[in-house]
Image (cartoon, coloured by chain):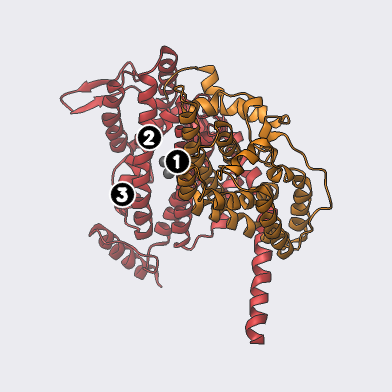
Amino acid sequence: MSKEEILNMEARFERYVAEENKVEPKDWMPEKYRKTLIRQISQHAHSEVVGMLPEANWISRAPSLRRKVALLAKVQDEAGHGLYLYSAAETLGADRQQLVEDLLSGKAKYSSIFNYPTPTWADMGAIGWLVDGAAIANQVMLCRTSYGPYARAMVKICKEESFHQRQGYEIMMALAAGTPAQKKMAQDALNRWWWPSLMMFGPTDDHSPNSAQSMKWRIKRKSNDELRQEFIDKTVPQAEFIGLSIPDPDLKWNAERGHYDFGEINWDEFYNVIAGNGKCNRERLAARNKAHDEGKWVREAANAYAEKQRVRQQKQTSAA
Amino acid sequence: MAQASEKYVLRLADNILILGQRLGEWCGHGPVLEQDIALTNIALDLIGQSRMLYQYAAEIRNDGSTEDDLAMKRDVFDYYNCLLVEQPNGDWGKTIVRQFFFDTYHYYLQEFLVNSSDQRLSEIARKSFKEVAYHAQYSAEWVIRLGDGTEESHQRVQSSVNDLWTFTGELFTPDELDREMQEQGIGPDLDVIAANWNKKVNEILEIATLQIPEETFMQSGGKQGEHGEYLGFILAELQFMQRAYPDMKW
Ligand SMILES: [Fe+2]
Ligand SMILES: [Fe+2]
């Protein structure tokens, strides 16, 4: 295709998505659209998988059998989300194995939030309530994203995420209504997770250069700041309801705006954790690499066995 | 109507809680996402089943104890799981072999318990039987895959079979309580379970091109509360919250 033809196609594509049509795997799409989506979907998949680790950390120590089962099921859901998303990325021509390699080598990114540690049980509450809560704000938007397979994966995932969020909030509620020791644990977790959760929405709009194009392509439909504000407005009353306080002295209701005003986010911390200096960056990648390396012989065995079976069946059919 | 003793129900429950706890250690660390999910599923089933049994044991005890009191507040010598399930995960192959040995036993045990003269045990077994049957199928398939996979997988899984064999005898060695339960039609004749288990295990190991270990000394004591050193650490994690923050609601 000539350059002019491509530009023509791109203009048509933009009109097509602007009219709220869904793009399907076999449709023509701009190369940059495809690349942007592969990057975004695979990062999302990696986040689901790495995100299993901070919570898996508490499976063996959950305070009751009921909580243990719920936590196991939650972490398992996240693994399932990872699978859906890797499949969605594969519809764009990406190779799951390659994507995983990129995660393991540190080339690909995942959500920085999972580089924070989970030292106490209350972190299971805070993660479900805040981290899954922030993820939902983003994912509800993505249910209407222009790429069909991504949008459909999100619909499935969102249902489970809202369940996780309720479950997390319920853990916090039980703690906040408990003994002073439990309440202290809950408040401590909120103190540690509040700001990192706000950072999950990414840099402010004036520092988010790729956002405009993503909005044009209807991949994103709301800006980082809009989503962050939505999340804050929804979450502050939830904290108040269970008697926990948000660790932000500047937080107050602004009647004129109809939103909460909030304090300055520490973006140095955000970029520092992205740069690899969070408390658990090393552990998270090391854990994924260890699982992958130690699983190698298992994957090889499964492949070898499948191949043997294939040959055996072939022999059987040709004999018959 | 026949009713199992509390200790007998605890044996059943402890086996699957401890095994579920071990499997839970894999969550997030499996060799591939699909199998991470599959193993977590089994852990979920087992811990779910253990809860029904602890609830029943608590009813028999009838002193206001809850499922969590029973799981979280007994020390090693009051835990009655067999030694097999407390063995460390080792590599994926060892986990699979441990699972296969236990699942096969669990399958025939449940098959009996479905018709136990203890109505509650029978109901619980009915609810769990499909799950248990699926576990047995899953672990048998993986034993075959690994045994008949590559040279490395074959060697690894054979050495796990050899290592864990010594813990299988206990499953089928009746003590006084087993005999009592058998007489009342509550529990099975362990000789019958053993015969079924041996037949199945032989069959699967043969397909997997694996060798049955030679006569081995059989360890025992778990179900009487005589454990090795692993269980204490399992309980340290399992019970941490209830010990550090006693008598609170979660
Ligand atoms: Fe998720
Ligand atoms: Fe989630």
List the residue tagged with mark 1. A74
| Residue A151: image location, x then y, percent | 34, 54
Spatial separation of the CA atoms under disc 2 and disc 1: 9 Å
List the residue tagged with mark 3. A215
Ligand 2 near label 2 (Cβ, under 8 Å)? no
In this rendered view, identify the residue nearer to me: B132 or B25.
B132
Give whichever of discs 3 and 1 has the lower sequence position. Answer: 1
For residue A234, what is the image quadrant?
top left
Q: Which residue type does callout 3 highlight?
A: Met
Establish whether labels 2 and 1 are both on one chain.
Answer: yes
Assess whether mark 2 and mark 3 are in contact (beta carbons under 8 angstroms): no
Q: Tell me what hue chain A is rendered in.
A: red
Classify 10 Å Cα crowding around label 1: few (below 14), some (14-19), many (20 and above). many
| Residue A287: image location, x then y, percent | 62, 39
- Whether residue B81 is situated above or below residue A157 in the rendered picture: above
In this rendered view, identify the residue nearer to me: A54 or A177.
A177
Residue lying furthest top: A180
List the residue tagged with mark 2. A167
Chain letter, colour orange in render:
B
Residue at the image position 64 percent from the left and 67 percent from the top = A306
Assess whether mark 1 and mark 2 are in contact (beta carbons under 8 angstroms): yes
| Residue B74: image location, x then y, percent | 58, 24
Give whichever of discs 2 and 1 has the lower sequence position. Answer: 1
Residue at the image position 42 percent from the left and 57 percent from the top = A32
Instruction: Identify the subunit bearing mark 2.
Output: A
